[in-house]
Amino acid sequence: MKKVAGLILNVDGEDDSLKDFLQHRSLSTLPFGGRYRLIDFTLSNMVNSGLSHIGVIGSHKYSSLVDHLGTGKEWSLSRKTQDLSILSGSNNYHIGRLIKVSLRNLQNNRGFLDATGAEHVLIATPNLVTTFDFRNAYDIHLKNDSDITLVFKKDDPLYHLRDNDLYLEFTKNRVSGLHYKREQTTGHFFTEMFFVKKSILVDLLDLSERTGDWDLMDIIKHNIDTLQVFGAQHSGYIKRVNCLENYMKTSMDLLDYKVMHELFMGKNSIHTKIKDNHPTLYNDPAQVCNSIVGSGCIIDGTINHSIIFRDTQMNVGSHIQNSIIMQRCEIGRNVNLNYVVMDKDTKISDHTTLVGKPHAPIVLKKGTVI
Amino acid sequence: MNTECVAMLLAGGQGSRLGSLTFNNAKPAVLFGGKYRIIDFPLSNCMNSDIDVVGVLTQYRPYILNNYIGDGSAWALDQVQGGVHILPPYMGQKGGRWYSGTADAIYQNLDFIDRFDPEYVLILSGDHIYKMDYSKMLAFHKEKEADLTIAVMDVPWEDAHRFGIVNTDEEHCIKEFQEKPEHPKSNKASMGIYIFTWKDLKKALLDDAGNRESEHDFGHNVIPMLHESGKRIYAYPYSGYWRDVGTVQSYYDANMDLLDTNCDFDLSDRNFRVFSNNTSRHPQFIGSQAKISNGLICDGCIIFGKVENSILSHDVVIHKKTSLKNVIVHTGAIIEDGAILENCIVGARARIKGDARYITDPADTAPEIHVINN
């Protein structure tokens, strides 16, 4: 993996339903799973697979990303031999449609690509919840002398594929066609993680410079006959968070011990920014089951089927179920919450009841006081 | 280089009265309150007191301790000049030897302290659970123009015979020392925290090193010698939570204080934080059959059973149909299906079989605390 540089894209602007969470942050730093940010998965997977030069493309809402990643120490990326670069992003919108992998973003960061000395680039989106060892995919990439190796997964109705998601068509083991969902489905979809030879990427960048077509996946699709494209299968758990509904569902998946075990208790762990919190204190009246709880909380209430982030305080007589409570929230006495997603630093005063719906939870913006 | 005050933390003790908790581990590195280690308290105090040069004197089983301290960044002690320094015994031109007493440990590191050319030296030990702003004690030391200041606190009269007791005048000047006296004249107990004016300490250590009769101990030798020679020794009165955790029972009781809402020792106080060297772990997973009441629980735990009035360190797994009451579980221990534990301490990475029964008589108000390791 020494010859591979990692590049994590910015994917803001795909869906409006998460906009309340994305006023001050990009999707990559959306809090997830009690203590993580979405980008922790892709970044940790790259580090755990042995990559040592990783660039993360930011959005214009930088501060949350910079604050979270810092020097990359928690991912072992602040060593003399390993590094993390935070790269500048450009607007993801093309007139009238969304580009999945924008070469304009890569063009802006040619310096990063040139400086790494890598022969291959591993490109992935930051909103995938999965643990994946890229080494097998890299072996396939090298063995076939591929120009591009796409990580794919068997069709999954729970994945929430959209019209502009891509399906792979194989001839023997070579990818002979790429189809948007609106055109054709094949049973194997693209997971938005792929290896590309740097020389090919540079050629494609030069091509797009001339033609003005910045959509990398579109270019690959149209040149599938001349490019050597192969596939590497992902057979484990993977979910993509790109709307409120699947943020909720993917979060609640963690309450299934099998999913929790695969994501967090395998041989490779998901790293995240470390905070100094005291252990979580459950006082006498607390009753907690079927939940994930971060450290630094003080809990006096009843919690069921919920995800509670670090430093949350919850007072006597309150009940939380089917909800996600992000960092540093304060919940008063005799509060009832069901299907509620509270962003960071939200306060709820005594005797408040909020009940959302499974498909439309109530969302409280960061810093709300009710 | 000039530093006003250098802290020297005595962390070489074996802590044999903690039994199997210190078989593989120095006492200052014993886990406390779930995620902490005892040494977190003095190191965090240093950080909260703006003391940024700390020498840690190690000797007994230092690996876990050294590894835990690392570069000191967990306590903001990773500054370029100064920071934390681990000081094991070493070889010199004339050979080397183990630290033979608390004063000898400092004596062997005179060169280290001189490098920082301090006015004052703060002597700490890694045996106590407390929060203290040493800068206030230093201000007191300067105000009194003392040669030595000893932190003291009032202990219950009936316990005074277990401590080193000082008798002072109204100005807090120490007139008399009594070491574990049968008939204490006061209830002011030494907390084992000293601030010396460095030139006085240096001279005293050189004198003490030349004394063949001496055991090279601060409490027994150096401080009485300074007292006899008429040095200005003051008692800095401290009031607040302070516990010696030298025995299994006192260690257990101090841990359980953290679950007591009436106890004034607050780990969540943002104005005086206790830091520790954290690693990344997943959040707690609490299964649908789990029941938790009154617990202090760390990241990485997986709980399917019943946990009552207990403290769980990192990565503890509690299987279903288990019951834990008044238990302290150290890192990585696994409690298998059906085990019932009461009033005990489970050592790090122990695996407790499902047929384990550690049950105490409910009528017994002070049951003996077992330490389970396997």
Image (cartoon, coloured by chain):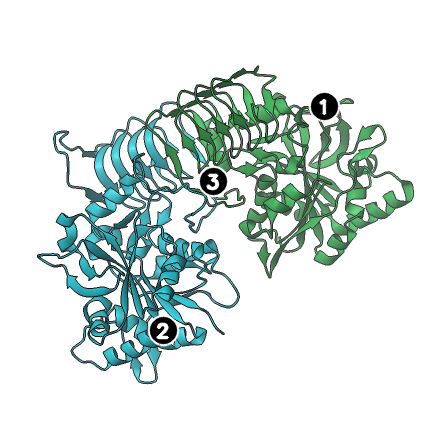
Q: CA distance from mark 3 to mark 1?
A: 32 Å
> Which chain is mark 1 on?
A
Q: Amino acid at mark 2?
A: Trp
> Horizontally, is B75 left or right of B328 in the view?
right
> Which chain is mark 3 on?
A
Circle 3/circle 1 CB separation < 8 Å: no
Q: Nearer the viewer, residue B33 or B232?
A: B232
> Horizontally, is B281 left or right of B167 in the view?
right
Based on the displayed image, in which of its 4 quarters is residue B199 positioned? bottom left
Q: Residue at x 22, y 39 (%)?
A: B344
Q: Amino acid at mark 1?
A: Thr
Supply the letter of whichever chain is green: A
Q: Amino acid at mark 3?
A: Gly
Circle 3: is it few (<14), some (14-19), or many (20+) Cα within 10 Å? Answer: few
In the image, residue A313 lies at what x, y percent?
45, 31
Residue position marked by numbered label 3 in the rendering? A266
Circle 2: is it few (<14), some (14-19), or many (20+) Cα within 10 Å? Answer: many
Q: Which badge, 3 or 1, comes first in the chain's sequence? A: 1
Q: CA distance from mark 1 to mark 2?
A: 79 Å
In the image, residue B180 lies at what x, y percent?
14, 59
Residue position marked by numbered label 1 in the rendering? A185
Circle 1/circle 2 CB separation < 8 Å: no
Q: Residue at x 22, y 61 (%)?
A: B169
In the rendered structure, the colour chosen for chain B is cyan
Q: Nearer the viewer, residue B82 or A199?
A: B82
> Which chain is mark 2 on?
B
